[in-house]
Amino acid sequence: MDFLTLLQILDSTVRLATPLLLACLAGLFSERAGIFDIGLEGKMLAAAFMSGAVAYVSGNVWLGLLAGIGASMALSVIHGLASITFKGNQLISGVAINFLAAGLTVVIAQSWFAQGGRTPQLTGGARFNPVELPFAEAFRDIPIFGPIYAELISGHTIIVYIAALTVPLTWWILYRTRFGLRLRAVGENPAAVDTAGVSVVGLRYAAVGICGILCGIAGAYLATALQAGFVKDMSAGRGYIALAALIFAKWRPWYALYATLLFGFLQALALRPDLIERVLSFKVNGQLLDVLPYILTVIILAGFVGKAIPPRAGGEPYVKER
Amino acid sequence: MTAPAIELKGISKAFGPVQANKDISIRVMPGTIHGIIGENGAGKSTLMSILFGFYKADKGEIYISGNLTAIPDSQAAISAGIGMVFQHFKLVENFTVLENVVLGAEDSAMLKPSLARARKELKALAEEYGLNVEPDALIQDIGVGMQQRVEILKALYRKAEILILDEPTGVLTPAEADQLFRILERLKAEGKTIILITHKLREIMDATDTVSVMRRGEMTATVKTAETSPQELAELMVGRKVLLQVDKEVATPGANVLEVKDLRVVDDKGVERVKGISFNVAAGEILGIAGVAGNGQSELLEVLGGYENGTGTIIVNGTEIDLTGAHSDGQSRRDRGIAHVPEDRQREGLIMDYAAWENTAFGYHHDDKYQRSRLFMDNGAIQQDTVEKMERFDVRPPNPKLSAKNFSGGNQQKIVLAREIERNPDLLLVGQPTRGVDIGAIEFIHQQIVSLRDQGKAILLVSVELEEILSLADRVAVMFDGKIMGERLPSETNEQELGLLMAGITEMPDKPIIEAVEENLAHAGAGKEVH
């Protein structure tokens, strides 16, 4: 396998890891505050549809992105109401959101566009297009660095760069700010936060809100950057993979980056069965490659990869006790 | 005349049909230690939670230093200069001491300057009041004594002038408790006002200036501590005369009923909780096991009761019993004449949603007298049986159809005791028999245990209440870090000696006792299981 092929695979790794990373960080904010969220999948899907629809109608991808975030936020509010205000079961609420999104997106898409539950193809300004970083062409001929810069680092959509920046930003918020300290505390022991005179409900809604924004960006990326338009069930389990990555990352931002890159890499491999065959010199069943990320998910969730301790108050509504 | 630091006027609070506080008025003078004593469920904690803004009173007014103050939430209480140390600490386990102190009282949106200032402040407070803590240690790595000091520091860091402590000594060794009271004295000397909530008469007598007594949601009296006696306080708490001392004859031990040799228990995390202990209990005697919670006593009871695996030898009435496998369960233990009153009656002793009559049959529901035919149980017989048991054990209300959760703690315990004692066991295991039980019921429960002993039964009593052990047991063994540190006769020992054994110290140290105790506790990592 030559250098350029490797770069191509890594390039698609980055593209495929981006929605996973955004969803994973979304889950990180929510779960660090003690709200388990298996509704990442549904929120991404809803965001993908709304961003695709609005981008098509308006022809402006940025409006699409905003609409996607709005859709995801709406579902976040439902999750917040169910699990924070009404102290319901967070898993049930998450499952309900996933079903809701899976059903509603197709029904509405059919009613609006009548194309079998998809949005029309997005073109031009209705999509996020690759951004050419400065000097990409000028550096291309420098050995090693040139191709890495031009092929791997340059030429992604703006959302990929936003996602990359979100990692240090998340770390900084969590560990360097007052908000982060309180957010982590509310996921570990909400009673400590409450008796310190800080609103548990407020913090948890803030976390769920951030989760909604990030999921919205992830969903919009699927429909307006990775692909050109919304298709039925296009999130394809990415929300669940992001959750697995979150556990793998032990709820830490930098590890979330590494974990989602690993999953992205496996997904990228599945797109190039020809390459696998050349390297291993025997044919690997394409479907086997497709399930690799999911197998890794099962392995991680079964706890084979070290012990992951979730935030202690995770999944439990806060009820005042003496 | 100076205004009271706190004055509550006509505070009432109901939880559904339960009136937790009824028209309570109290004045706490500045610069004093004011005790609030009462039985479990008397409404002490509710009252203090109202003062700290954790609950909202239905009626009543709060005056702080003479000014009417609304306290809708904890933030308002903190601003009013009130700090509270809860019975169950409100600390974030995987945060450092410093982070816990700063949480909620940060100076700005950025953490760094807040942490730096808190570090300096903490050092100053530590020197001023003798509150030594390690600012960078994680809460989960420090002992309960230090965790409690962190809670006090949290309050002081927020400029609390009034400090409320809810049952502060429950998880401390006697030496740590003594140190706590020295700290409280120092805080008082600096002009702070302290409210001490406890059910322990001795602490009230030793530490407070004034004491208020609560009974069934009402404030029954406020007296100067110097002008009262434990006997009088106990009567005020219960509403009638009570025996504080257990009346019992000298034991006449017979043959060994229980022999334990080199027992070891490893918990499901792979940590050895019982580290090779040996002891005997003879017929007609009570062996008391003392120790701070979390030093292996629970695991010992669980193995003996048949619901935890162990290794070693346990001989009951001359025959060995299985410690693992199919013949190591509650049923086979009962078949061997072992009855068990578990430590946590609400989790292990009763099914809270089941009626009393169902609960009195548990474990013995296969008895012939409860069967009508091969298929059907004779519920009428069980209910009749329960009615009789309830009468003999003075369970109130004597209604067998009421669910367990609707009885008070003391009456729940009586239901469990009635079930286990009435089987006439050879060996009774009793864990924390009076935890969360009112004084009136304590007296009755203690009498039952002693009378079972007098019938020639063997009794193993595990309790974290040293007073209880000293008044009931004929011999005392002290557990620390999974081992038995020593055995003493109650007549030949005292609380100080047992207190040192509870901290794992077998000889009088040549340095200050509290230092030796803390060193040992930190070394063994004891107390980590207690939160």
Image (cartoon, coloured by chain):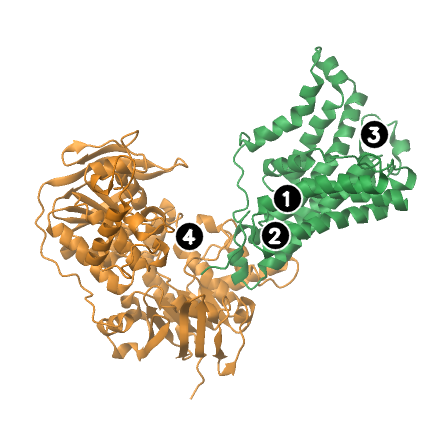
- Contact (Cβ within 8 Å) of mark 2 with mark 1: yes
Nearer the observer: mark 1 or 4; the answer is 1
Tag 1 residue: A96
Q: Amino acid at mark 3?
A: Glu
Nearer the observer: mark 4 or 2; the answer is 2
Chain under numbered label 2: A
Q: Is residue B506 visible?
A: no
Dot 2: what SS?
helix
Dot 1: what SS?
helix
Chain under numbered label 4: B
Of mark 2 and mark 1, the one earlier in the sequence is 2
* Chain letter, green in picture: A
Residue visible at 27% across and 30% down? B327
Q: Residue B207: x and y, percent?
A: 32, 70
* Alpha carbon distance from label 4 to label 2: 30 Å
Q: Residue furthest top?
A: A281
* Alpha carbon distance from label 1 to label 4: 36 Å
Q: Quadrant of residue A150?
A: top right
Tag 3 residue: A151
* Chain letter, orange in picture: B
Tag 2 residue: A82
**What quarter of the picture does the C terminus of chain A occupy?**
bottom left
* Alpha carbon distance from label 3 to label 1: 41 Å
Tag 4 residue: B531
Q: How many marks?
A: 4
Chain under numbered label 3: A
Q: Residue A19: x and y, percent?
A: 73, 38
